[in-house]
Image (spheres, rainbow, N blue to C red):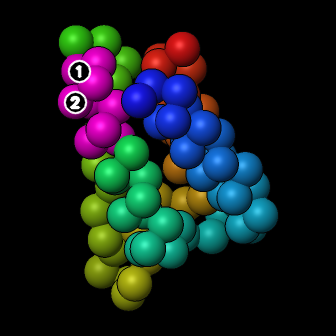
Amino acid sequence: MADDLGARLDDLYEKLGSFPSREYVPWQVAQVFNALLAAAQKADGDDPVIAALQPVEQSMLGPVANVDCATMRTTTAILRGALS
């Protein structure tokens, strides 16, 4: 499971690199991040880094998350590192 989760986080990290860094994350992509975060918390919720991360929320601006792509990409890398 952890290897599969790691591969999915790696893939998300790479895909986020194709978006402009200061653009808000599309909500569909944010939902994928939230699902991966939930799986990581279920698998290793005692890790202090994983436990500290919170799901992203939908912005009031429309079908986007409340974070930009650079922030989510960094958070994805941090989550991936915590699983290693």
Q: 72 or 38: nearer the eye?
A: 38
Kindly identify the residue that appears in the image at 47 percent across and 36 percent down.
5
Quadrant housing the C terminus: top right
**Along the horizontal axis of the image, is 50 left or right of 12?**
left
Secondary structure, magenta segment, majority class: helix
Q: Taking 53 as reference, is 51 above or below it? A: above
Task: Count all numbered tags in the image, as a single digit.
Answer: 2
Reading the image, the residue beneath label 1 is 45
Q: Are marks 1 and 2 in contact (CB under 8 Å)?
A: yes
Q: 24 or 49: nearer the eye?
A: 49
Mark 2 residue element: helix
Kindly identify the residue that appears in the image at 22 percent across and 12 percent down.
46
Q: Could you tell me how far apart the alpha carbons at marks 1 and 2 are, in whole angstroms?
A: 6 Å
Mark 1 residue element: loop
Q: Is residue 41 magenta?
A: yes
The percent position of residue 66, horizontal first and vertical second, equals: 39, 64
| Amino acid at circle 2 | Lys
| Amino acid at circle 1 | Gly
Q: Quadrant of residue 22?
A: bottom right
Q: Taking 45 as reference, is 76 above or below it? A: below
**Along the horizontal axis of the image, is 78 left or right of 55?**
right
In the image, the segment drawn in magenta is: 37-45
Q: Quadrant of residue 81?
A: top right
Number of residues whose C-alpha sits closer than 10 Å to that of mark 2, classed few (under 14), some (14–19) or many (20 or more): few
The percent position of residue 65, horizontal first and vertical second, equals: 41, 68
Q: Taking 54 as reference, is 43 above or below it? A: above
Reading the image, the residue beneath label 2 is 42
